[in-house]
Image (spheres, rainbow, N blue to C red):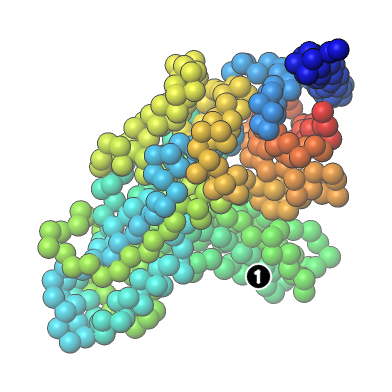
Amino acid sequence: MISKFKILLILIYFFALSFETFSQTEKKHYESAIGNLQSAIKKITNSPFFDQTIIALDVFDLTDSVTLLKQNEKLLLKPASNMKILTAISALMKLGKNFEFKTDLYHTGVIEGETLYGNLFAVGGFDPEFSTDDLDSLVRGVQSLGIKEIKGGVYADVSMKDTLYWGKGWMWDDDPDPGEPYLSALNINGNSIKVFIEGGEVGSPAKVTLIPETDFVKVENHTITVPESSSDNFTITRDWVNRTNTIIIDGEVRKSAYIDSSANTEELNIIYPEKYFLTLFKEHLENAGIKVDDGIDLQKLKENSVYLASIDRDIDTVLLDLNKETDNLNAEMLVYAIALKDSGAPAIADNGLAAVKELIDSLNLNSDDYFIADGSGVSHYNLVSAQLLLEVMKYIYYDRKDLFDTFYNSLAIAGVDGTLKKRMKISPVEGNVHGKTGTLKGVSNLSGYVTSKNSHLLAFSILMQNFVGKYSCARNLQDKICILLSEYDK
């Protein structure tokens, strides 16, 4: 007669045997799914496009903690705006998700009746999202005190930042592109101005509108209005060669009942953004009926100045434009905010970028193996790898759960918003891929997260470099890879 103990041993043996068989079957299925994914992606990377173009790939299943694909993942390539991934995560870690940018307004002297016998001081705190609407809020703060005349001037304290107006490796001939804004502790409207043009009477100059309207820039209008049957042939630029804020408009503008606002509008960066801020501030004060007796200038805030008002900006708002709209000013201001916190004023970009290197070193990688030149990716000096980008995205997912949602929600969503709004629409990954694009001449990158068919969250980095012609080919191949990742099902 078999004892109960022997029966138990037999049951345990058959259970273990069944489990081992199941595990082996599961393992084979797992390996087969990964193999199928790798084969499908290999067909894409074998495209003739890559005969002359470099591609680097790194894909990781965050749910199962398994590597799915690696190809040239350690190659050093230009990140372009994928650099913002490193900046955003470093900023969240250093500044915290409750950090706020501040632009403060003070006055000196005394207020007697409707007159301020003193000066106004705007103190720049690196807010990259400050706008003319915010400026009007400050004006209302002055109005609330009943002030109708300022027996003084309007000053800016920009002493929190160094005097460098661009990042390392920014290209001189990118000026006056608003994507390469001049940097200041005191920013407004992205440190740029919009110029709208429309035809007038045939034979007369076209009509020019500045947004915002200001006397800070000078306009040279050399255009002529031509009949509606003609074609537009005009240029709008800033005299960047001589580093002035003179806007030069040349060419023929057709008279038309229908105006394409996007085609007829040019946005240009502005040199001396802090003086641009001050000029707009004085103009808005005067438009509100507040007379300013003196001019504008840069000066450090005086001791015993009286606080008036602030405009506060949470880091979430800055990150949204940073990653969804790939805003370069936002990236650089985050770098300076880190530098100010870590090393004090005047903030120096290298001190802020040290936080990025610190993050890299914490991942058991060596920051000396990469070149970190700026926070936005504008610089052609930057060199990183797909492996590095992936490891940073893995880190915030696994080790900083408290920050992950903030970062994840700041990324552009395929077919929905940001730089991915027009990509992957009406596809299996519309609304699924959360990613950061990156574009420079001959460079197209996409890194982020995608949820696969088996509901696993995958992190991926796709870097493409050294191609000529349109970016659409590179982007289409990236989109195809994302679709394949979404179809992964182990």
Who's the residue at 34% across and 59% down the image? 103
Quadrant of the frame with the N terminus? top right
**Residue that badge 1 annotates:** 204
- The number of callouts visible is 1
User: Considering only vertical position in the picture, is 241 above or below 382?
Assistant: below
Q: Is residue 296 above or below residue 319?
A: below
Left or right: 142 in relation to 204: left
- Say if 427 sits above or below 485 in the image: below
Up-down: is 192 above or below 144? Answer: above
Left or right of 81? Residue 358 is: left
**How busy is the neighbourhood of tag 1: few (under 14 within 10 Å), some, or many (20 plus)?**
some
Q: Residue at x 40, y 68 (%)?
A: 135
Percent position of residue 238, x then y: 52, 51
Q: Where does residue 77 sit, x and y in percent of width and height?
A: 61, 22
Q: Quadrant of the C terminus?
A: top right
The image quarter containing residue 334 is: top left
